Amino acid sequence: MFGCLVAGRLVQTDVQQVAEDKFVFNLPDYETANHVVVFMLGTVPFPGGMGGAVYFSYPDPSGLPVWQLLGFITNEKPSAIFKITGLKSGEGGQHPFGMMSIPQTPSVAQVGVSIEPLEQLVQQTPVASATVSTVDSFTQFTQKMMDSLYNFSSSFAVTQAQMTPNPSEMFIPASVILKWYENLQRRMVQNPNFWKS
């Protein structure tokens, strides 16, 4: 029913069912992983009105698993990427895995999926640091590139009184760079793919 991908290295589909509505993946070598992708395999949908809450449990020195809510998946949103960097320490919150005797090796983290009603899933608050930006990498790159060009060119700004006349060199007013920056930013907000047309 579910699959799990760890940082592009390890795809798992051999989920362990620990209760009628609860499933667990073991994640060996989790220390070097930054992200986890949990997805539905497409073979069995969730029952109507249900979805899957996704939890992460790191090995705790006390020996007891500490579960943290990452988010959820549904039939309409059958996969999600979660950032697990920074979740390796701290306290967990309420979770449906309770005091289940799920075997856990000290060097193995776990991802749990709990099937729950959709109304309940949307009311839960995931760990803030698990959220992955929904802005695609192209949009992020474009914004960084615009910022970099504006900052770089602005670092050479001089007033007209400070300018040394040089007939072989062209000068671009800072207001033109600022106008370009603002126009491109506006167009990216309206349609990030405007450049393709």
Image (cartoon, rainbow, N blue to C red):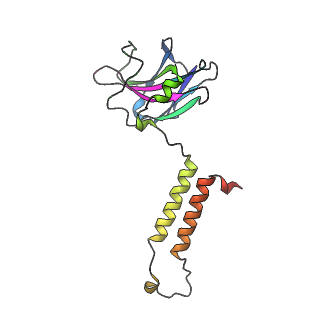
- The quadrant in which the N terminus is found is top right
- The quadrant in which the C terminus is found is bottom right
Q: Choose top left, top right, bottom left or bottom right for residue 47.
A: top right
Q: Nearer the viewer, residue 157 or 14?
A: 157
Q: Nearer the viewer, residue 170 or 131?
A: 131
Relative vertical location of residue 126 with respect to residue 164 in this rendering, above or below? above
Instruction: Point out residue 155 in the picture as x, y percentages from the top left corner.
Output: 44, 71
Please tell me whether residue 83 belongs to the stretch shown in magenta.
no
Instruction: Point out residue 141 in the picture as x, y percentages from the top left corner.
Output: 54, 53
Instruction: Point out residue 53 in the picture as x, y percentages from the top left corner.
Output: 49, 25
Q: Is residue 10 visible?
A: no
Q: Which residues are magenta?
A: 54-76
Relative vertical location of residue 84 with respect to residue 18 in this rendering, above or below? below
View extreme (left): residue: 62
Q: Nearer the viewer, residue 24 or 46?
A: 46
Q: Choose top left, top right, bottom left or bottom right for residue 182.
A: bottom right
Instruction: Point out residue 44 in the picture as x, y percentages from the top left corner.
Output: 62, 18
Relative vertical location of residue 196 with respect to residue 80 in this rendering, above or below? below
Q: Residue at x 64, y 19 (%)?
A: 43
Q: Residue at x 48, y 26 (%)?
A: 54
Q: Is residue 13 visible?
A: yes
Q: Residue at x 56, y 73 (%)?
A: 176
